[in-house]
Image (cartoon, rainbow, N blue to C red):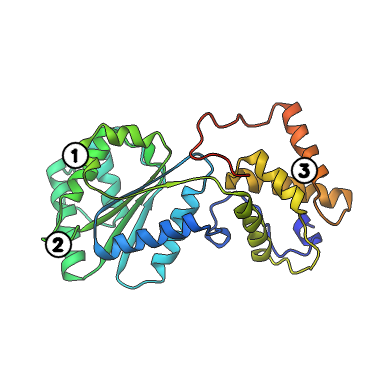
Amino acid sequence: MSYYRLLGLDREPFSTNPDPAFFYQSPQYRDTLANLIIEFRLKRGLSVVLGDIGVGKTTLGRKLIQMLRERSNFLFHMILDPTYPSEELFFHDLTRTLGIELPWQTPTLVDYRDALERFLFRKALQEEQTIVLIIDEAHKLNELSLEVLRLLLNYETNDAKLLQLVLLGQMELLPLLMGLPNVVDRISLKGTLTPLTLLETHELIAFRLEEAGYRSHIPLFSPEAVETICAYTEGYPRRIAMVCHQALRQLVMRRERSVNEGLVEELIQHEMESGWDPPRRARKLQPSSC
């Protein structure tokens, strides 16, 4: 039997997979999602959301897709790995992702551009749909790929962009964008996701346990345990989930009823001694409030 069943849970509460059902919407995440929807409605074009590793960018993208599914007149797609060595390969993947059928066996760059332009105009103007393209791991884009996206953003009417583009990337994306003024000038929404505060860490853990089916009045994590988790993980959601998973597993093995500060400190000490302790962040997006 899985450990979470023994704790009165219906499912794994601290998976590190980007499941939108377990996406805790702290104020910054909630505001980012709301602002993205507004950008789509106004058809402003390019939005960029930056964040360090493990801060929740991919999960935010999945949550955004879930929200778009609940709205009519949205056509949306997500590219998970935008690593393209040439413009042709990027155009090929874009047309395939958007479901565009090309009449040419060996299309040229001009053919790709014409097909994409016709597609965007037909969907946006004739069918009145909002086309959203979300690119995860956008820091992997090279200058050629960014130039392709700039060209697509040129497709517009007098008052709207035909493609709504969202770039989700690590902080390395920022200097790349700053080196391309013709792309930076087109960014309508700029956002940066930061680690969670202590209060938000408490809320994230409680939210995930509730979503996983925990209904007991006995708290699975003591306040001191959560404070230690927050300090050790520096508020990064992925690390929080990993430590919480390890703590619950130990809870079952020891046949105890709740995770206390001592148990968490033992886990941390073990990671440090085994060499698996992650390096401290060389650069903080904001001072840690854990």
Rendered view: 117 above or below 123: above
Residue type, mark 3 in image: Val
Give the residue drawn at x 15%, y 50%. Answer: 154
Evaluate whether residue 88 shows in this view.
no
Q: Residue 83, located in which quarter of the rendered image?
A: top left
Q: Badge 3: few (under 14), some or many (20 or more) residues near its Cα, within 10 Å? A: many
| Mark 1 lies on residue | 182
At horizontal 45% and vertical 64% (from top left) the residue drawn is: 66
Answer with left or right where residue 44 lies relative to residue 166. left
Residue 185: horizontal and vertical position, in percent?
21, 43
Looking at the rendered structure, the secondary structure element under dot 1 is helix
Whether residues under marks 2 and 3 lie with C-beta atoms below 8 angstroms apart, the answer is no
Residue 199 at x, y percent in the picture: 62, 54
Marked residue nearer the N-terminal end (1 or 3): 1
Looking at the image, tell me whether mark 2 or mark 3 is earlier in sequence order: 2
- Which element is circle 3 on? helix
Dots 2, 1 in contact, CB < 8 A: no
Q: Provide the residue designation for mark 2.
A: 159
Residue 129, given in percent of the width and then of the height, sits at 25, 68
